[in-house]
Image (tube, grey):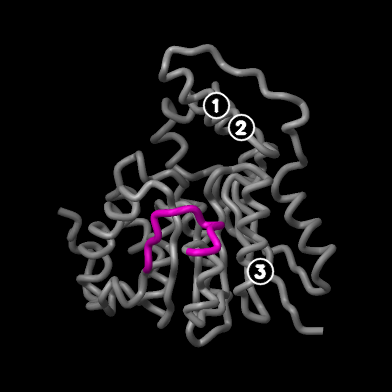
Amino acid sequence: MYDFHFGSKREIEENQEEFLIFVKRLLPRWINGIPDSECLAIYRVLKQIKSDRPILIETGCGASTLAMFLYTALFNGKMFSWDTNGSKGFFLKSVISEAICKPLKVDIHNIWSFIGFDSTSKHVGIPVLSELNNKVDFGFFDSWHTLDHLMKEINCFELVVKDEFIVALDDAYYTKKSENFSYLNMIRAKLGLDSVKELESNRCEPFYLEVEKYLCDKYSHVKKIDDSYKIDYEKDIFFDYYKTDRESMGKHGMEIKEKLDHRFDAWSVSLDS
């Protein structure tokens, strides 16, 4: 069903970004949550990794998974994904197996591990990578979209990182501290219920500011990555194609058009003194 022909393995290697978007556009809307420009920005950031055997993690699956899988498949890597919605992982496995693994002649099970559970669990979450003797180069965080949960994930991530690593965020402009009222109110609307007023105490600085401050306070060598998303997103056809859907999301505060330049942010960190 998803084994549309793009070209040979060599043609894919020579046209990696075109192939990535080719596969991304096979996805149905429910799992195609990030714009093409962000997907490409993730892939370009990944190519800054210096490791001979890159290890990647993500919290929350979707189109980002395609970018990370393609990179690990082409550059001898391995990746781990956490998402409490197991159906997303199972669906993506079928897409990746047919659309990417088949032409590249790689085994998905040797590259990607999907864990349908809480990413912060000490038993099956990010911390178990130490039990598997894996040190991580890159983390993409896109789960519950609250600062409290994001920082828990980053703290778990810090336990298993290499001496040089990259932190990347989706929806980095969000300002939800403990509860994601935008998402909760979207569900309430589906139930025919009125919206719940968000308390001022639930506000924080945008995630990209909070995370950057945290990293800079803790580490001596932190560099903000100049990602391509901020250059490309305004001409991304993704936003026009899903315009009606995104307007509905905007009504519940799930997307703020004026702040989309910080939908994606990333930093490189070095532990070297």
Q: Mark 1 and mark 3: span between their CA atoms?
A: 33 Å
Could you say which is closer to the camera, residue 265 or residue 85? 85
Read off the residue under disc 1. 250
Whether residue 241 sits left or right of residue 249 in the image: it is left
Residue 114 among magenta residues: yes
Q: Is residue 83 above or below residue 96?
A: above
Please state, as top left, top right, bottom left or bottom right, where the C terminus lies in the image.
bottom right
Tally of marks:
3
The amino acid on which the numbered mark 1 sits, given as a three-letter code, is Gly
Q: Is residue 116 above or below residue 182?
A: below
Q: Which residues make up the magenta segment?
A: 113-123
Q: Mark 2 and mark 1: span between their CA atoms?
A: 6 Å
Disc 3 vs disc 2: Cβ atoms closer than 8 Å? no
Disc 2 vs disc 1: Cβ atoms closer than 8 Å? yes
In the rendered image, residue 17, in percent from the top left (x then y), is placed at 41, 64
Residue at the (43%, 52%) spot, across then down: 83
What is the crowding at mark 3: few (fewer than 14 residues within 10 Å), some, or many (at least 20)?
some
Read off the residue under disc 2. 256
Read off the residue under disc 3. 158
